Image: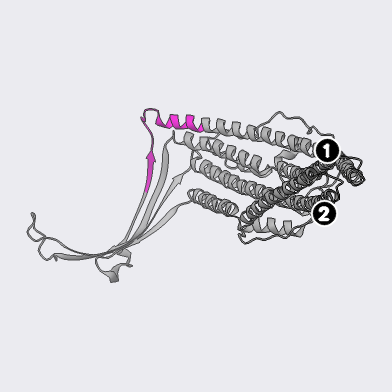
Amino acid sequence: MKRLALLALVAGCTSLAPEYRQPEVDLPEDYPSSLSDSSLAIPLDWWKLYNDPALDELVASAQERNADIRLAAARVQEALGLAREAGAARYPEVNVVASATRTRVSGEVVPAPAPGVPLERELYPLSASTSFELDFWGRLASAGEAAQANLLASRHSRDVVALALAGSTAQAYFTLRALDAQLAVLDQTIALRRESLSIARTRADAGLASELDVHQAQGALSDALAQRREVARQRSLAERLLAQLAGRLDLKLVPADLFALPLPPLPPAGLPSELLARRPDIQSSEAALIAANAQIGVARAALFPTISLTASVGAQSAELSELLSNSAAVWSLGLNALAPIFDAGRRAARVEQTEARRAQALAGYQRSVETAFREVADALASVEAAAGVEADLAARLAAARAALELSNERYRAGYSPYLEVLDAQRTANEAELAFVRNRQARLAFSVDLMKALGGGWSPPPP
């Protein structure tokens, strides 16, 4: 923010652009949250908090090889070239011209060439010329300021892409690990249902149960097998998405434990909303606002005369050997002024256009700040809710496992029908998958919070 404010002050005393002041957006001082207090700062490479070398490697590969990040880097290079071009316009341009010509004039013209003057002539001119616009009204200074602001905006836009790319990579990775956990749950479910099918067949062969139990057990097993095929398909899609994000289309990842990933620390209670200033999208919006403000100075300067200095020095001779002699020297010095007299309001209309663009940029900046505050508040609420739900789901899972074990024992002893076992199996399977999905959501919400805060946070000063 300080760099942007300093940039806005450059050439302020020589330009016709309005004085730039950082807009004030009315926001609450703190984010609404009841999370536990913490004083731990989160670094910009926040994904390393998950302590997973595979994730670190994927994010590093994405930030190096992903097409979106390379496109953003190329746009920065383009903006850098435009800024250098705008800065160079404030200095004189010097050109050197050298030529050699041989011409023949007609001897039958009126009046005829003077006697003794040859009809064929040679000419060797050599000159250096320059032109320089006197920036009385700050047009060039304002254009340079706008170009520098656009350069900063493109750099912050590249940071936006990098932050979003790291977040997308982390969330896709967590999705993959959650699908690994679901496959492990379903493998266990399939094993239990195979065992149940075997028990049902044994009891039916012994006359202790009907064929209905066998058919119900077979249907439950087939349902679990179909679920596993669908989850395996989703895992393949998640792996392909990670391969595209990381720029490694041949990527293959072996299964790993979702619950081995640590949960990042929670932000401190009363997190100040001023942390929004570090978000790259907000910095990019403010840089665009500074550029739009500077363009007003460019348009206003066009209402006044343009004054330029021109000069040239060189030599001209009919003989190449005499080109550097004192008598062959030529030079000129001039002052040009170009003032608009009547343009039917064209230049005034351009000033109105630039003022309207500044108003649009101001509205865009305010919207980006308000959106950022909402995103942080939403992420905090989601992280808090997912943390609370996990305890409830853990209790539900423990109860479902106990109910399944008890129903199996009662069925083997002949005290309950097989329908009770089927219901317990379905409840336990749903509880296992819900617990896994909530952990995935909790990790994903933590990534949303990292992104919303611009990549981590720092504790407020004491």
Q: Disc 1 marks which residue?
A: 389
Query: In this orientation, which residue lies closer to the viewer: 294 or 243?
Result: 243
Query: In this orientation, which residue lies closer to the viewer: 99 or 432?
Result: 432
Q: Amino acid at mark 2?
A: Ala
In the shown orientation, is residue 1 left or right of residue 397? left
Mark 1 residue crowding within 10 angstroms, few (<14) / some (14–19) / many (20+)? some
Q: Disc 2 marks which residue?
A: 260
> x%, y% of residue 184?
78, 53
Q: Measuring 51% from the left and 34% from the top, which residue is drawn there?
A: 296
In the shown orientation, is residue 278 left or right of residue 364? right
Q: Measuring 81% from the left and 36% from the top, which residue is drawn there?
A: 385
* Residue range (magenta): 334-354
Is any part of residue 12 visible from this angle?
no
Identify the disc placed on residue 417.
none
Q: Residue furthest front?
A: 207
> x%, y% of residue 40?
84, 47
